[in-house]
Amino acid sequence: MTPAAPSAGCESEALPVLRERGQREVFCGLTGIVWLHRKIQDAFFLVIGSRTCAHLIQSAAGVMVFAEPRFATAIMEERDLAGLADANEELDRVVDRLLERRPDIKLLFLVGSCPSEVIKLDLSRAAQRLSVKHQPNVRVLNYSGSGIETTFTQGEDACLAALVPEAPSAGDDSLPSLLVVGALPDIVEDQFRRLFAELGIGAVDFFPPRRAGAIPAIGPNTCVLLAQPFLGDTARALEERGAKRLPALFPFGAEGTTEWLKAAADAWGIPEMEFRRVVAPHRERAKRALSRHKETLAGLSVFFFPDSQLEPPLARFLAEELGMRPIEIGTPYLNRDLLSEELKRLPPGAVLSEGQHAERQLDRCRAARPDLVVCGLGLANPLEAEGLTTKWSIELVFSPVHGFDQAGDLAALFARPFARRAVLKV
Amino acid sequence: MQLTVWTYEGPPHVGAMRIATAMKGLHYVLHAPQGDTYADLLFTMIERRDARPPVTYTTFQARDLGGDTAELFKTAAREAYERFKPEAMIVGASCTAELIQDDPGGLARALALPIPVIALDLPSYQKKENWGASETFYQLVRTFAPKVEGAAPRTPGERPRCNILGPTALGFRHRDDVAEVKRLLSRLGVDVNVTAPLEATPSDLARLADADVNVVLYAEIADVAARWLERTHGQKTIRTVPIGHNATREFITEIAALTGVDPAAVLDDANARLPWWSRSVDSNYLTGKRVFIFGDATHAIAAARVASEELGFEVVGLGSYAREFGREVRAAAEKLGLTALITDDYLAVEQAISELQPELVLGTQMERHIAKRLGIGCAVISAPAHVQDYPARYSPQMGFEGANVLFDTWVHPLVMGLEEHLLAMFREDFEFNDAAGASHLASVHPSAPQGTPEVTASEIVWSKEAEAELTKIPFFVRGKARRNAERFAAEHGLALIQLETLYDAKSHFAR
């Protein structure tokens, strides 16, 4: 009898998933505004929410955004809650004042919040009304970043999904194009653009675009390559427009980036030898950069608290390329479809957890005594004070970490807490 | 709806968190949606606390709304009690939970926990952080220090005793202010009975009545509770805030009079350096520096007095985001011949500062943003503040040492005396000039103020020569010169500002 073929990814061999409910130490989707407002340079984000929403965004931004922010909150007050017609009039007034102050705005997002969702303030109707009122200068769209519906990076997903209908249609006869989806730092976009050009992959667009007027056309000949694992709704909206998603690892580390590029190269029919020739020097450079950090990190255990949905791809990167040992990989939401390639590559022995019961997870973490804890800002200092070494997960979303030339930087983020411990003599 | 870029205060439940986090043995169960846990990082990151705030959040999501969010609350409260075993619990709702009307107080009572449970009613759509802190502290004081009929009065001849009320978690220099005030009281021979809420337990609050006097350090937090203690236990209240040299002396005199101790030895403190530092000839250049002040009421009012009386600055603007104390701030402004700016609209404050063109801004983190954009020196005097305003070193605002600290931190952002002259004399020196800013502040030089919203009276035009001359005037007085020239032109019906207009205005306003 011939042995069965290895069944990677088959449910029976997949990692166990622990699903929990309880207190979650996570941000809501509004937090995405902190990076999105810099990415799309003529867009403005107006949260329709409470004082809590305004306070959250400025606290998450660390009140460090000194430049004029391209976001604000329309804070609902007692009288707005009394009657909905009134709330709509108020919203129109606030938007008028805002646009008067910032005539450079071309795209305005009305961003829903927990309170606006609970009182069922219809922001899509408001967006339509305001779009008509302010056309052709300003396009008004809406999405929800509320905590009752979105966790942290899901806010970007909701924002991009709302932007998809704005894309012009590319017909059946249009040339094949590659759409890289997910807000990336400008420098990373430029690096990828050069790599795709070297590979001979033509017509590459990035989504979201840097300017609201530059939304690429989408159609059946569009291939979508996700740069972030948390873009489920955006991917679905693009697929509904006929675009085809290329399943791949996410571009973290030398391996992840290679396979991510390979997915595009295969779709474009680039010969294997040609692909290797182009990618090899970049891949080698990434590996060289990783090798130094591997000395620090190999063999160390790591425990992820849920934060951004980047946890599974990062755990794969840390395990495969740096020899780390993931104990628990927490994610706020496990999208099996988008992570299909990643889940196959997670090392056995790790536990995947979805959702959170913060106290129980802290108990597990303390019992496991991991060498490194990746967690949010609320937990990091208390865990350090308990003697654990931590890495704030928010930095993984706020700094350039994708692609070959950032692989070393990504590893350095995990190595730095150890380097610091080694240096300090107090 | 209020359009808000930055907000001075968080929602009222964050105020309640500041009380819970300051205290020991108290736990807060907050009915709140996913995401509201962001507030933990205010304490663990900005204030660098080494423990999580004692807060349990229910974290409800959209799918729970159709179901049983009330059950979610009960489970969270029960688990929090079992895990943390607090002496007492406060329960309440954040803004979204307020809308779903689950009644956390009633739900918690139904659990019949064997500890006192206090329900907080903090209307999120009307009130803000400081109000929430004040209300929470008041409810705790009411609950734990009730009137006891037939309680033994304090024995005459006993050492005088006071409570210190108001310091919280995330307060601006509260930790060091408490240490400084305690030092003053101990030198006076006045014992401290309870300090609250900072470091107090619910059972400490039960001892509040056992003191002669309540010292209110921060009225925003403790005034309501102190008034209740006054009415209920007949305690006296000291409301003089010992910020600045003179106020510190008044504070000492007042508490000595109330408690019958001799203040003489404490009034003359050898370490009180502000008066001499201010009188020393090097400080001459501080005279009439135009300063704009904004903050909470306690700090803004105190800063205005110190700036005008003790440093010889000219206060050109005074305001506060604390509407609850608008009357007090207005009174302080009137004394200086000003109209107070009472607003929580960051844009209104920004506009006021850019119109007034002060040489120094004393404000919160928000005014630091504004001052940086306008290229004006700034020192932070009040919450909200960022991580760098929670210093490792001892840095009180109160007491004689606090006055020393104020002198240092407010003078530091200014260009120093002789440098000021050199900059004016040799404007085009290639390495020491206007654009280089104050030489001891290389990192914050104002050579490139970002997007300066120059407020120029619309109809008045500057000639090329006048505009060029203006650039030769050092940056720290340029705003004032521009403003004076425009005012002079407006008053004299001139549509064009010539080179001569600039100097006419200079002589006109020099009178």
Image: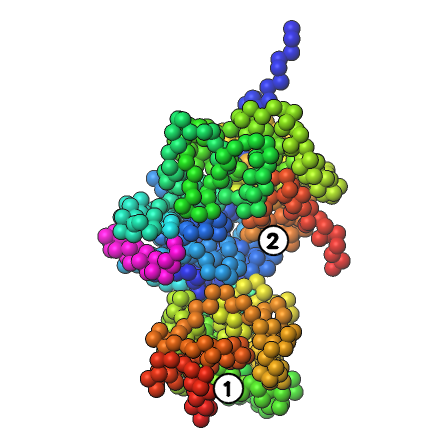
Q: Amino acid at mark 1?
A: Gly
Main secondary structure type of the part rendered in magenta: helix
Instruction: Determine if the magenta segment contains residue A98.
Output: yes
State the residue at coordinates (52%, 38%): A228
Which corner quadrant holds the N terminus of chain B?
A: bottom left
Q: Position of residue B282 (x, y in %)?
A: 63, 87
Rendered image quadrant of residue A305: top right
State the residue at coordinates (46%, 87%): B503
Q: Which residue is mark 1?
A: B288
Per the model, the C-alpha gap separating discs 1 and 2 is 47 Å
Q: Chain of mark 1?
A: B
Q: Amino acid at mark 2?
A: Pro
Residue that extends furthest to the bottom in the rendered view of this protein: B511
Q: In the displayed structure, would residue A398 be above or below residue B381?
A: above
**Magenta-tinted stretch:** A84-105
Q: Which residue is mark 2?
A: A382
Instruction: Determine if the magenta segment contains residue A10.
Output: no
Q: Chain of mark 2?
A: A
State the residue at coordinates (57%, 57%): B45
State the residue at coordinates (60%, 78%): B428
Q: Position of residue B246 (x, y in %)?
A: 53, 87
Q: Residues within 10 Å of mark 2 (few under 14, many from 20)?
A: many
